[in-house]
Amino acid sequence: MRILAVDHGEKRIGLALSDPTGAFASPLTVLKHVSRLLDAAQVAAIAAENDVGLIIVGQSFDEEGEPNLAGRRAAKFAAALREQTSIPVELFDESFSTQDARSAVIEMGLSRKKRAGHHDALAAVMILRSYLEANR
């Protein structure tokens, strides 16, 4: 079963896709944020096109373990996504996925100029990898 991971941000939405066996995670695309409903419709359509069986939405938390502002936005996005598709949608702790993505790009040895920019799809890969490892 293919799994689609979503790194929901204020400006962009990173997507990553697993292989059919659920063993590997690859970056898929980055969508520009328009509105919650249009974003959810786009993600639902991409999930259907890729024969996805589960959608994981990354959610961040504060020090007390409560969803922070970004985490609450992700939860609202997940709710909108559930209204757009019959594919199951789960929230998953994405703590540090963006920082992990930045570290991974640095480890790849890319120059500072080449690693500048956004790592939304790579952050979605980190979320998906964490999910796959936690559910083996």
Image (tube, rainbow, N blue to C red):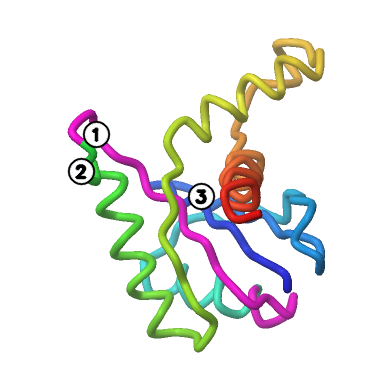
Q: Where is residue 5 shown, x and y percent of the image? A: 59, 57
Instruction: Report if the CB atoms under discs 3 and 1 are less than 8 Å apart.
Output: no
Instruction: Report if the CB atoms under discs 2 and 1 are less than 8 Å apart.
Output: yes
- Left or right: residue 64 compared with residue 113: left
Q: Which mark is residue 7?
A: 3
- Residue visible at 63% across and 19% down in the picture: 103
Name the amino acid type tagged 1: Asp
- Residue visible at 24% across and 34% down in the picture: 62
- Left or right: residue 57 compared with residue 126: left
Q: Is residue 48 magenta?
A: yes
Label 2, label 3: how far apart the Cα atoms are: 18 Å
* Label 2 secondary element: loop
* Label 1 secondary element: loop
Foreground of the two, 33 or 66? 66
- Left or right: residue 81 compared with residue 122: left
Label 2, label 1: how far apart the Cα atoms are: 6 Å
Q: Where is residue 86 shown, x and y percent of the image? A: 50, 88
